[in-house]
Amino acid sequence: MPGTQTLLLVGAGHAHLHLLRHADRLRAAGWDVVLLAPRWFDYSGVASAVATGALPVSDGRLDVAALAARSGVRHLESLLGDLDTGARIATSATGEQVTYDVVSIGIGSVTAGGGGPVGEDVVAVKPLARLQTLVDRLPAHAAATVSVIGGGSSGLELAAQLAVRDGVARVRLVDGADRVGAGLPPGARRYVDRLLAARGVEVLTDRQVTRLEATSVTLADGQVFEHDLAVLAAGLDAPPLLERLRLGDARGIPVRATLQHVDHDDVYAVGDCAFFTPGPLPRVGVHGVRQAPVLLAALEARGRGESTAGHVYVPPRHWLSVLDLGDGLGLAVRGRWWWGGRGALRLKRRIDRRWIDGYRGTA
Ligand SMILES: Cc1cc2nc3c(=O)[nH]c(=O)nc-3n(C[C@H](O)[C@H](O)[C@H](O)COP(=O)(O)OP(=O)(O)OC[C@H]3O[C@@H](n4cnc5c(N)ncnc54)[C@H](O)[C@@H]3O)c2cc1C
């Protein structure tokens, strides 16, 4: 009978945005849908360009409250504070309680530690709302030195973009591995190496950071480098909240292929905060996006009292990702295939705009 079971969505990440848009299908399957999430969602596809001031914040910002209202979903504008999986009660950070039948958690990730103490004024890549303040933290004088710690996708994007930004004189990119862009195909890696060299980025590889402060970075070999601003981009972990709630650990909430918690059939997890036990997945938006229709179909079946066993997530072997390297250049990669240049960035902007407009009700 419609409307007799409560589905609580925690976090408005990629997968849950899709469920919000299709809330009518969930209602038709018998769910009363409740969302517990902050008002704003910031889209990571444009995060580095927003952080360096190349795009305005509004280009990547979605009004979750407006989407929930359009979809007829009750929205508690807060964060998850506590979850009692036995009693099936969620408590928000502001103290409101929701009794649910099924909960789905999609609260994203946090920045992984840099290998030692990290000072308060260091800008980490997550949360994105704080990364957006990067450009305002650049010193007023026109010759800033910036250290970026971590040579993965977000560290590469930020180092490459900062190197061509007015007011930045010097960019240092530090990584513990023997090369930056380790996940890229060899030709794409060489493309990035050449681009960083042409922009004067100082790349320090095989260097472990032992301390990162707002004004200096200390390496394991004792070297200390000074800077005006430090950016921590050393990878992504699941939020520590999950460990406190005994739902998972830094790898995430352990889920089966059905996206259900390994020990709790009533708890689903998606995106960066999920630890996909059939085979760990990298923390990229594509998984949240592609898990969404699987989760939606599983919940529709469950609401109608049908079997959900067939609704499993099969991760794609390859997917397109495009780095924004600044100055109008992009690097598109899919498996071993890659393509660098202006067309790659134009493609990225088109894909990102279409995705975000889809949730603004303007597409
Ligand atoms: C600088 C940067 C650039 C990136 N660029 C790309 C890219 O171009 N392409 C790509 O595929 N990936 C990119 N990534 C990775 C990407 O950010 C993540 O993989 C993706 O955002 C994960 O999606 P998600 O839906 O799991 O979580 P998110 O998109 O992080 O959404 C989670 C939501 O949950 C909310 N939330 C958090 N805690 C709580 C709580 N306690 N209660 C309720 N709600 C909560 C958050 O406010 C957020 O809106 C980038 C990452 C960074 C840091």
Image (cartoon, rainbow, N blue to C red):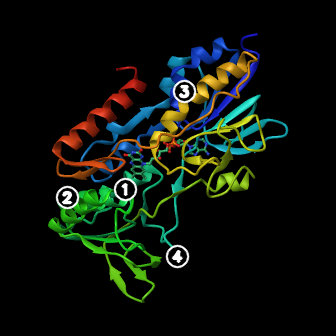
Q: Position of residue 17 (x, y in %)?
A: 51, 30
Q: CA distance from mark 2 to mark 1?
A: 19 Å
Q: For this rendering, which residue is in front, 299 or 257?
A: 257
**Relative to 219, is 141 on the left or the right?**
left
Question: Foreground mark, 2 or 1?
Answer: 1
Looking at the picture, does residue 362 appear above or below residue 258?
above
Question: Foreground mark, 4 or 1?
Answer: 1
Q: Name the residue: 84% across, 40% down.
A: 86
Mark 1 lies on a secondary structure that is: helix
Q: Position of residue 284 (x, y in %)?
A: 46, 47
Which callout, 3 or 1, points at the residue further toward the start of the chain? 1
Question: Which residue bears the numbered disc 3?
Answer: 293
Q: For this rendering, which residue is in front, 345 or 48?
A: 345
Q: Name the residue: 19% across, 61% down.
A: 195
Which callout, 2 or 3, points at the residue further toward the start of the chain? 2
Residue furthest out toward the right: 87
Question: Which residue bears the numbered disc 1?
Answer: 153
Question: Foreground mark, 2 or 3?
Answer: 3
Q: CA distance from mark 4 to mark 1?
A: 21 Å
Mark 4 lies on a secondary structure that is: loop
**Relative to 28, is 137 on the left or the right?**
left
Mark 2 lies on a secondary structure that is: loop
Question: Which residue bears the numbered disc 2?
Answer: 165
Q: Amino acid at mark 2?
A: Arg
Pointer 3: residues within 10 angstroms few (<14), some, or many (20+)? Answer: some
